[in-house]
Image (cartoon, coloured by chain):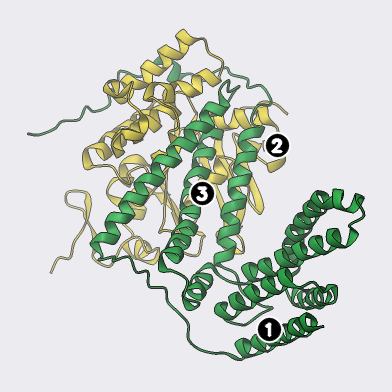
Chain colours: A yellow, B green
Amino acid sequence: MGNIELFGTEAVELNNICYAYEGNTALDNITLRIRKGEAVAFMGPNGSGKSTLLKIINGLIFPDSGSYLFCGDEVTEKKMKDSAYAKSLHKRIGFIFQNSDAQLFNTTVYDEIAFGPRQMGMDEEAVRQRTEDCISMLGIEHLRERSPYHLSGGEKHKAAIASVLALNPELLVLDEPMIGLDPRSQRWLVDFLAQMNEAGKTIITSTHNLDLVQEVSDRAILFGEEHKILADEKTADILGNQPLLVSANLVDEYYHVHHDNGHVHFHDHE
Amino acid sequence: MEKTIARPDRTAMPEWLMDEDEYVPQSGGDTFINKSILAVLGVISRVRNQSMTEDSANSAGAAVKLLGTLLTVLYIAVTKQPSFLKFVLVYELIVLCLMKPEIIKKILKVSAAAASLTFIVMLPALLWGNTYSCLTITSKVFLTITAVNMMSFTTKWNGITSALKKVHCPDMFIFVLDITIKYIVMLGDLVLNMLYALRLRSVGRDRSKYGSLAGVAGTAYIKSQEMAVEMYHAMECRGFDGEYKAVVRSRFTKGDAFSLLIYAGLTALFVFYAMM
């Protein structure tokens, strides 16, 4: 089987995906397509199946029924048993976990970032170059020799992002990337994702953060508590549809948009 | 003093990030990670399943089941009568028959493995002509493991801890058991995610895969320490004074009465055979 062939314009294609954890439905008949170069947000309440779908996209788990295609090639459990195929998929899809602790296992930030390039068999000079590029892109020069475990939440997040970027993935998948970040780091991440998207990377972000979702995506896919897709529209349209957001349990009845200055916030105007 | 944070510099994108890598991975080298993932998944799902266990075969309360299991294990260990062991075997088989097939399979698998191991250990005794001891000890191991598993597969963890409280087990023991179970799941989840992350980034030949796994273990250890300190502080803040109050179900049900009747019968049989 070997490497995944690159063809078509769809990065991700999901057809009638169903998945259940020991009888409990996590995804119910999910069908969607994500084109190369798109920035898409998965929105939905806790337990709606967003994280499960991200795991399926990364080839960590497999749907009970339905099919998943990455760049036109169907990803199946059987194919993923072929080590070269699995490595090729993992190289092309970068997954940034919600909990950065889970992603950092090397002794220094430098080694953490260099882990991927070293795996790819690059010579040490090329590894150093790529690692330094990532370090400087994320502005974490001062963390180079620090142990990842003793960093702050924002610093860990940056180290985790750098370690994934070093693999130069085509698709970046981020699970709740804003959680645990202070406002400045959130702003930094929003700008960074925009920059990555401009560079041609396809980006899928799973998020609850309605304040920033419009800035990290052009298109949003809203998951409901019934584990189905409730809406697949432009992010601005979904954010402007309060009844839809209320029905998805993403906001309460006080949520509203100030059209005059184009921002969304949460408070009661009494 | 206001802290500033550098915004990403849009001109500082390295060229390699704009291009696609021409990289063809080699096969192999990831079996160890995959096996570790399966092992961790197995432990987590076992503990989680235990927490969601629905008892179809034995509707008795956890305390009655715990007491009955302790008595059964004690009688099996003490008895010298093969006939009594046969009665216990019949009793266990009847209860097993009322369980779901997948649970029966799991229980018998563990019991058979333990009995086989015991038989192998006892083989020298068999070769020296001590057939009776060899068969009796192997049977006792099989029956004991089956009895304990029958209880554990049909009782939720919180049921077991409240049953321990009912039989006046020390609070500290119950507390440690409760926290251990909770931590197995929480740390198991963390380790599982770390192994997933390791697998996702293992896109080639890892020359130090044991080093990476040691990193996973080290991080899990540090995390467990942090969690323990945080929990200690949280408990102190909530006035923990060393006494762990487990909720005890006091309602006596028909299932309890029926089970007690069976255990009474087993006790009578044990006494009868002991006096023979």
**Looking at the image, is A49 positioned above or below residue B172?**
above
The residue identified by callout 2 is A79
**Looking at the image, is A216 positioned above or below residue B21?**
below
Seen from the viewer's position, the closer of residues A149 and B146 is: B146
Seen from the viewer's position, the closer of residues B275 and B185 is: B275
The residue identified by callout 3 is B188
Marks 2 and 1 close (CB-CB < 8 Å): no
Q: Amino acid at mark 3?
A: Gly
Q: Residues within 10 Å of mark 2 (few under 14, many from 20)?
A: some
**Looking at the image, is B169 positioned above or below residue A21?**
below
Which comes sooner in the sequence, label 3 or label 1? 3
**Looking at the image, is A111 positioned above or below residue B240?**
above
Residue A89, percent across and down?
59, 32
C-alpha gap between disc 3 and disc 1: 37 Å
Identified at 32% across, 65% down, the residue is: B242
Q: Label 2: chain?
A: A
